[in-house]
Amino acid sequence: MYATKYHRPSSLDAANAALSGADDGKLLSGGQTLLPTMKQHLAAPSDLIDVRGIEGMTGICMDGDVIVIGAATTHAEVAGNADVQRLCPALASLAGGIGDPAVRHMGTIGGSVANNDPAADYPAGLTALGATVVTNKREIGADDFFTGLFTTALDDDEIITTVRIPATAQAAYIKFRQAASLYALVGVFVAQHASGARVAVTGSGDDGVFRHAEMEAALNGNWNASALDGIAVSSDGLMSDIHGSAAYRANLIKVMAKRAVEAC
Amino acid sequence: MPKDGGIGASTTRREDIRFLTGRGKYTDDITLHGQTYAAFARSDVANGRIKSIDTTAAAAMPGVLTIFTGDDFVEVGGNPAGWLINSRDGSPMKEPKRPVLAHGKVRHVGDAYAAVIAETAEQALDAVAAIEADIEELPAVVDMAAAVAGGELVHDEIETNVCFDWGWIEDNRAATDAAIKAAPHVTTLELINNRLVPNAMEPRASTADYDPGTGDYTLYTTSQNPHLTRLLISAFVLGIPENKLRVIAPDVGGGFGSKIYHYGEEALVLAASKRLGRPVRWTASRTESFLTDAHGRDHVTTIELACEKDGTFIAFRTETMANVGAYLSNFSTATPTFLHGTLMAGNYTVPNVYVNVKAVFTNTAPVDAYRGAGRPEATYSLERVIDKAALELGIDPIELRRKNFIQPDQYPYASAAGLEYDSGNYDAVMDKLEAMMDRSGFAERRKASEAKGMLRGLGVNAYIEACGIAPSNLVGVLGSRVGLYDAATVRVNATGNLSVMVGAHSHGQGHETAFPQVVAEMLGIDPASIEIVHGDTAKIPFGMGTYGSRSLAVCGSAVVRATEKIINKAKKIAAHMLEASDTDIELIDGQFTVAGTDKSVSFGEVALKAYIPHQFPLEDIEPGLEETAFYDPANFTYPSGAYACEVELDPETGNVTVERFAAADDFGNIINPMIVEGQVHGGLAQGIGQAMLEQVVYDDSGQLLTGSYMDYTMPRAANLPFYSVHHASTVCPSNPLGIKGCGEAGAIGSPPAVINAITDAIGNNDLAMPATPQAVWSAIHGNA
């Protein structure tokens, strides 16, 4: 790892100041992606601004039937939170299935969604649950937030503060893991909302997480795995790599979606 | 003394106390006064011409002490291949030089072309990044078939990418061809034995310490065989006299073959320590391990099995391309030939065998022996083509094997591939295996799987391997440039405890527990009073080290011979003490007794007498009680066995779960059954890993796509079943312990059992390792 300057501000203003004063500053939360990347000399930010000490950045609370999760809240906290487990068990299950215990006790929801790894779990959860990402500047709906591989709608100087997730009991997330990394080779999050079904797919899209409109249409009015039987998932726009061809991923998307609906 | 810690006792491993409490002492744990650190500049292209290397900026970096490039080693020797293979036309194999640092060309991603020595490891790495190398990238030679066909060369000076084109046994070629041509049935199968990274838990590390006051060098290094490493450095690479070079292999965290070999980093730190007069340490990162440890396997094979309609085998014929990577690693030429071709008769009374192996240079990391080393490749080819033949002929796969098994009354048995098998009872092992697997209950279990939408399959195999490597006379004829004996010194201390210095190195095998069991059994003393010393050329006799399941069979036999000498001398001392003839002295339970009397002295009293030789018959007996023996085996040993695997798989995803795995092995006599079972478990994990998970992938430009654990799948506990393990025993006649060796069997026998189970489940023989979910799903659905 190359030398870097570490900041631990206690307010958003101080974080902003550190970020704008740095040559090439990076926000640090759980560091589960950024730090290994730096250790391999693949990233060399001049400054690291640790957001975990910012007041109000951690913890989980309810705002009506919306779960509000501080951006620096770890996966383990989300997985173990009683409200999340009761009101949105699929989200607790997703958080409890990220990485391994060490990752879950360091990695955070804000870090995960800001990184938008195409194989990460949270992007599928937030998209299917219709979540809203709240920053120091604005609120961004999940559909608009995840814009491509490792890219989001965030500006360079924008800091995620909370994630607001409408609690949805009728939801499930099933993933098929890539054997080496245990990331999702394909992960499908399904959720039934008053406004309709949402099906979000991670691990597969050339542009990262995406919703599958045809499956959503099939599930609207017939929330049943068999509703997906007739759907042919196209491999267009899906990733192909040494762990899975686009055709194999397309197959898994349908299989995982059906299993997710069955699991609801 | 109680003998319950002797031969046959499942004594817990004494070395585990330090390993499990974090007190093991590995090379990287040894820090010397004034130590400096090396880091290597490694090629990021697979094939390239070095046009210039500018180290000016790097040399000016903080903490940098000195920098080496290939120019610094032009005058020294290359790292040699230990085995000469001749091609079918009689010409010797091609042996391009393997330099300490790349010179002229870089030949694989990770090939080191410069090294920086600095005050800290971080400074050395930072300076490596400042080296400006102008390397012209050339097209990479990656695919073996293309490499054989010609075009771009890995080594320009040898004018071919084929190291050798070997026939075994060449004189049998015509007869085998004729037999296959005339055969009523021929089954053909094309196979890939997938390339693996050894992945020892401890990365390679080396620390060199040159003493300008004495001219002595000490090298601490992760080696399975410190004397062999010293020999290679002294005789071939740096020319340091053996008596001025001490090689210490302290605790070593696993090798699996990859730490047999001498690597350039060892020579570099020695040269650097000489230049600086300070110790120099290098420890590989995991990335360097992936890029530069000698990889394993990587064969492409076509095998044919010719048989009668009733399944009687007539001939096996194979054509194999074996990848040796960019340079010849020390055993790389022996592995695909004499550790592979000689096993191509398997456990069977087949009259005709012919093997053709082309060894091929590519712009990839060197490939060499990895747990099993050639024998897994042989077993996999044989046992898969047999299953395919069984399917084609409509014969039960177990019955087809039984029909062709060598029978117990046929030993010693001269196999059609040139070995003399020593003992075995393959039907008895198979009987046991069928019982262990509850084969009769399989149909019910399959029905239950199908009821929940799953498929279920049962696969078996038989294997034989050649271990106890190896008789020097035989391997000398076959091209080995070294002898493969081993050595032990048994030192009885004055107070009656023992230090036993052995040539074999223990890096997970449990020697420190098992070897004392042998000595304790022979002397009738407490094994706790016996200490094993290994891994230091200054302390131990010249031994050839640990690989090829040889430690107990060869080095253990040397321990037996040395202990016999101890007993003979001790009897003379006891006879003197008891005023009797030494021919009348019996050693029973640690007491030397005059036969037929109650006159006796204890082992401890004899030991004390040896070192306090008052009134000693010096004209007949020297003082002291210390003996050395070198043991060279009369033959290989031939462990054999049969494995069975039962899988359940999800046809919608291709995901396979190993539900049951049974291993029935014949290892001959067993010293410590618990350690043997542990060795089998570890081998099975590696074999199942090869069959289902592990795979090295280089892209067309020679970049390693599986260069970390994010992409290279190591087996995890959740991937593995609970094993059912059984040891049958036919005694090995060719060593005094009657043992055959157990270290590699699990990795040899398990891959075909797993794949045969999966092909049984899906009813389709077209399946390659690793049987990843996608591969299985594709085989079921016919999708690419």
Image (cartoon, coloured by chain):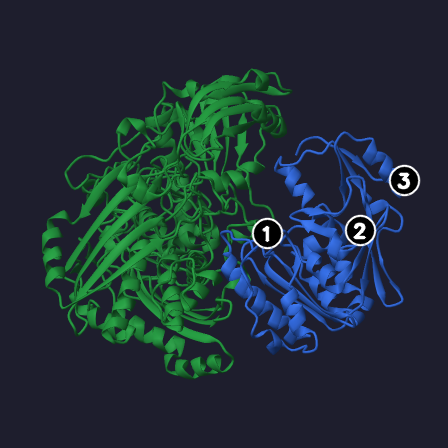
Crowd class of label 2 (few under 14; some 14 to 19; many from 20; radius 10 Å): many
As drawn, the chain in blue is: A
Of circles 2 and 1, the one toward us is: 1
- Give whichever of discs 1 and 3 has the lower sequence position: 3
Q: Secondary structure at mark 3?
A: helix
Where does label 2 land, which residue?
Answer: A72
Where does label 3 land, which residue?
Answer: A13
A88 vs B307, left or right, is right
Where does label 1 land, which residue?
Answer: A206
Q: Secondary structure at mark 2?
A: loop
- Give whichever of discs 2 and 3 has the lower sequence position: 3
The residue under the point 66% across, 36% down is A43
Kind of residue indicated by mark 3: Asp
Name the image quarter holding the N terminus of chain B: bottom left
Name the image quarter holding the C terminus of chain B: bottom left
User: Label 2 vs label 1: CA separation?
Assistant: 28 Å
Kind of residue indicated by mark 2: Ala
Kind of residue indicated by mark 1: Asp
Q: Is residue A8 above or below residue A61?
A: above
- Give whichever of discs 2 and 1 has the lower sequence position: 2
Q: Secondary structure at mark 1?
A: loop
User: Label 1 vs label 3: CA separation?
Assistant: 36 Å
Q: Give percent across and percent down for residue B197.
A: 45, 47
Which residue is at the front of the view, B419 or B401?
A: B401
Looking at the image, can residue B69 be seen?
A: yes
Crowd class of label 1 (few under 14; some 14 to 19; many from 20; radius 10 Å): some
Of circles 1 and 3, the one toward us is: 1
**The color chain B is rendered in:** green
